[in-house]
Image: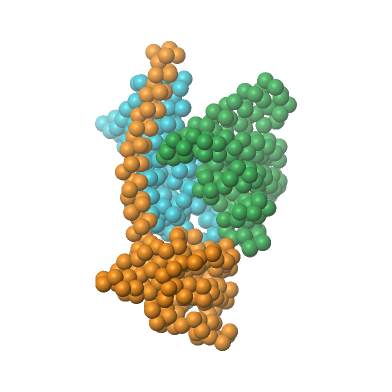
Chain colours: A orange, B green, C cyan
């Protein structure tokens, strides 16, 4: 039983069975994984721009146009990644055609947020992000910088990163509310 | 993740130290950090194999698995490649470099199941590092492993003579000491803007 | 009667007497890294259990056909197959959990518990016994992850399974240390010391 031939045959056989099983699993799960990714992006976009039912990606991972049932453009959503205390903070912002913010979603620690739990991580709490809703570019500043947003106690760096990142994003992307032509030459991301 | 080579090195070496911050490779850490000599031998073996493994698996992934659309075989391919590599290194050292073999030879078989090696090869792929970045990442991680295991073995040699309660002797006190060293390493967070 | 008794032992040994994490001191990395919350810890335990039980059963089924001299490579292939299956399944159906566990899912392949059980037990025992042994070791691993995850989540975040269980002032300023690596090390040190004390056996 212990001949060299048998050794080789058993190894090859087990490799083939394993590779075949994995190819099947991969084929099945690959579709699902892609769907999950699309669904996650769609879900995030819907939370920041609830009036839109269909989104069109204009700049990969950066800018989306939102349309309602009639196909009219109701606003845009954009992603900015300003540098916080522990690393980049991923922020998805939705604005409607009156230039007002409709929603703000901050990536979770599972999606790469590195802020300190109990301090900077509080940027994800609704009382903080809800402060941005229905506000325009000029109001998006910390109160101590002359704006309208309350900072998180003991986490000024994280709060200011979110506020300034959002405002800079508005400056960069607001013009796409009225134009369809994308003249995108990259963005300073501080990553 | 940083892209600059110097930052990759610092992140792997100190800020995201593989043992104390990422908690990878703990079995050999607590197993062989009992004396300075074994710590040196183990560190040398890990550093050497980590660099070789990072290169070999990088080529395997980018020249074989990716073009053939076989990425789902990554786990199986990497572990087999590393196991074979360790065997070859052991045979080669035994034949050609007896001194080196006697210094780190006995640690080589242990390395096949050292998760630090495999973790570095996976992370090189996950972070989309190119060959240079992958090399620097492996170098930083290996040196970070060596730094901690050598520092820690010096600490444990002294712990052996300390008057410690019976139930804390051995592993428990080693864990608690590791906790304090890890706390010190947390102090590196924020260095050059590097995060956990 | 005797046989049933030994079967029962295969199952229960792994939970306390031969607990992989706290008695045999193997599989430490995932135990420390993924026990930040109960949910993450149990997710890791489920993935590892699938691999331990699956590899044990398959290795035991094939034990008469596996030549002794190449058994280790064959075991590694079997284990990495199960690891890749759970890896892709989690990516597809539990993407949030998968992002938290990250590289620790593929690293199950070098978890000493898995290869150790396949080599020391499954290769020499029947399919049923191997299943029970794998189940027992998995339960032992799960138990430790559950205990660590519970303590770290309650002290580190003030929650249990994501639900608030502590007063608001504590959740405002929880013991952040427990979430970070030092907290994990000190907690497993204390658990190991308690085990040493109550099992009255020096493990070193």
Which corner quadrant of the image does residue A143 belong to? bottom right
Residue A100: where, in percent of width, then height?
42, 81
Residue C38 visible at all? yes
Question: Eyeballing the image, is C121 above or below A25?
Answer: above
Identify which residue, B131 or A96, lies in the foreground: A96
Identify which residue, B161 or B116, lies in the foreground: B116
Look at 61% across and 54% down and name the residue there.
B3
Which corner quadrant of the image does residue B90 belong to? top right
Look at 52% across and 32% down and name the residue there.
B81
Identify which residue, B44 or C200, lies in the foreground: B44
Question: Image quadrant for the C terminus of chain B?
Answer: bottom right
Identify which residue, A148 or C64, lies in the foreground: A148
Residue B34: where, in percent of width, then height?
65, 41
Residue A124: where, in percent of width, then height?
45, 71
Q: Which residue extends farthest front?
A: A181
Look at 54% across and 64% down and name the residue there.
A186
Position of A81 with respect to C78 (left or right) is: right
Position of C164 with respect to B168 (left or right) is: left
Across the whole image, how many numbered discs are drawn on residues? 0
Residue A86 visible at all? no
Residue C37: where, in percent of width, then height?
44, 59
Question: Eyeballing the image, is B188 above or below C67?
Answer: below
């Amino acid at each position: 039983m212990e001949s060299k031939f048998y050794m080789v045959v058993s190894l090859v056989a087990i490799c083939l069975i394993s590779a075949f099983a994995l190819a099947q699993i991969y084929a099945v799960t690959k579709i699902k994984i892609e769907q999950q990714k699309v669904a996650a992006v769609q879900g995030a976009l819907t939370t920041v721009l609830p009036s839109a039912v269909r989104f069109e990606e204009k700049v990969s991972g950066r800018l989306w146009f939102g349309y309602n049932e009639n196909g009219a453009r109701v606003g845009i959503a954009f992603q900015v990644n300003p540098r916080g205390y522990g690393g980049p903070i991923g922020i998805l912002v939705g604005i409607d055609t009156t230039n007002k913010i409709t929603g703000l979603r901050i990536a979770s620690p599972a999606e790469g947020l590195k802020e300190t739990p109990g301090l900077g991580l509080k940027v994800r709490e609704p009382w903080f992000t809800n402060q941005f809703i229905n506000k325009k570019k000029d109001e998006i500043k910390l109160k101590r910088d002359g704006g309208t947003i309350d900072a998180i106690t003991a986490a000024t760096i994280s709060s200011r990163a979110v506020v300034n990142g959002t405002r800079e994003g508005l400056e960069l992307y607001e013009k796409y509310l009225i134009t369809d032509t994308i003249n995108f030459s990259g963005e300073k991301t501080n990553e | 993740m940083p892209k600059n080579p110097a930052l990759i090195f610092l992140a792997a070496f100190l800020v995201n130290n593989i043992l104390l911050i990422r908690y990878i490779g703990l079995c050999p850490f607590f197993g062989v950090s009992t004396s300075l000599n074994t710590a040196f031998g183990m560190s040398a073996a890990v550093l050497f194999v980590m660099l070789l493994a990072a290169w070999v698996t990088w080529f395997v992934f980018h020249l074989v698995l990716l073009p053939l659309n076989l990425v789902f075989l990554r786990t199986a391919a990497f572990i087999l490649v590393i196991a074979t590599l360790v065997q070859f290194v052991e045979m080669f050292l035994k034949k050609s470099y007896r001194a080196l073999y006697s210094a780190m030879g006995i640690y080589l078989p242990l390395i096949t199941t050292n998760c630090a090696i495999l973790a570095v090869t996976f992370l090189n792929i996950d972070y989309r590092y190119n060959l240079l970045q992958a090399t620097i990442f492996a170098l930083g991680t290996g040196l970070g492993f060596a730094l901690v295991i050598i520092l820690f073995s010096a600490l444990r040699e002294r712990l052996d003579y300390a008057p410690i309660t019976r139930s804390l002797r051995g592993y428990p006190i080693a864990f608690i000491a590791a906790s304090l060293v890890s706390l010190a390493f947390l102090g590196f967070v924020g260095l050059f803007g590097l995060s956990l | 009667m005797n046989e049933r008794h030994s079967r029962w032992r295969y199952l229960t040994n792994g939970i306390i007497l031969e607990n992989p994490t706290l008695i045999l001191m193997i599989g430490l990395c995932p135990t420390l890294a993924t026990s930040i919350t109960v949910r993450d810890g149990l997710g890791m335990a489920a993935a590892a259990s699938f691999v331990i039980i699956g590899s044990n059963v398959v290795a035991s089924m094939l034990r008469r056909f596996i030549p002794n001299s190449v058994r280790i490579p064959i075991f590694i292939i079997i284990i990495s197959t199960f690891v890749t299956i759970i890896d892709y399944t989690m990516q597809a159906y539990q993407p949030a959990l998968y992002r938290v566990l990250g590289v620790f899912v593929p690293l199950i392949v070098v978890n000493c518990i898995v290869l150790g059980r396949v080599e020391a037990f499954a290769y020499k025992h029947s399919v049923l016994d191997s299943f029970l042994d794998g189940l027992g070791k998995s339960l032992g691993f799960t138990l430790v992850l559950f205990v660590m995850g519970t303590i770290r989540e309650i002290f580190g975040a003030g929650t249990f399974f994501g639900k608030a269980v502590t007063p608001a002032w504590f959740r405002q300023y929880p013991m952040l240390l427990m979430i970070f690596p030092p907290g994990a090390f000190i907690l497993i040190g204390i658990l190991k010391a308690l085990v040493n004390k109550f099992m009255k056996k020096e493990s070193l």
